[in-house]
Amino acid sequence: MAELLNTYEFKIGSIKLIPADGGKFEVIVDDKLVYSKLATGRHVEQGELAKLIGEVL
């Protein structure tokens, strides 16, 4: 989370965390699915999420 805020401080208006169950971890930016643990079957690697979000922003 800190990496995202530091990297995209002036581009992120807000971040919302929504609790879920069943191993679901999804990241959505501007209504676009950026990452899904259910689809990939794995957790994001360090730096991967910031890179994916940067591609959308």
Image (spheres, rainbow, N blue to C red):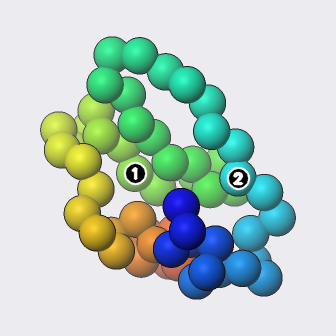
Calculate the distance from the C-alpha at mark 1 to the C-alpha at mark 2: 15 Å
Marker count (numbered): 2
* Placement of 45 over or under 3, stated as above or below: above
List the residue tagged with mark 2: 15
Q: Which numbered disc flags the more N-terminal residue, 1 or 2?
A: 2
Q: What mark, if any, has residue 5 been given in the picture?
A: none
Residue 29, horizontal then vertical, whole percent: 62, 56
Residue 36, horizontal then vertical, whole percent: 36, 43
From the viewer's perspective, is the residue at label 1 or at label 2 nearer?
2
Q: Residue at x 49, y 21 (%)?
A: 20
Q: Residue at x 28, y 69 (%)?
A: 46
Residue 25, horizontal then vertical, whole percent: 40, 37
Q: Secondary structure at mark 2?
A: loop
List the residue tagged with mark 1: 35
Residue 45, horizontal then vertical, whole percent: 24, 63
Identity of the amino acid at label 2?
A: Ile
Q: Are marks 1 and 2 in contact (CB under 8 Å)?
A: no
Using the rendered view, name the quadrant where residue 5 is placed. bottom right
Q: Can residue 56 be seen by looking at this rendering?
A: no
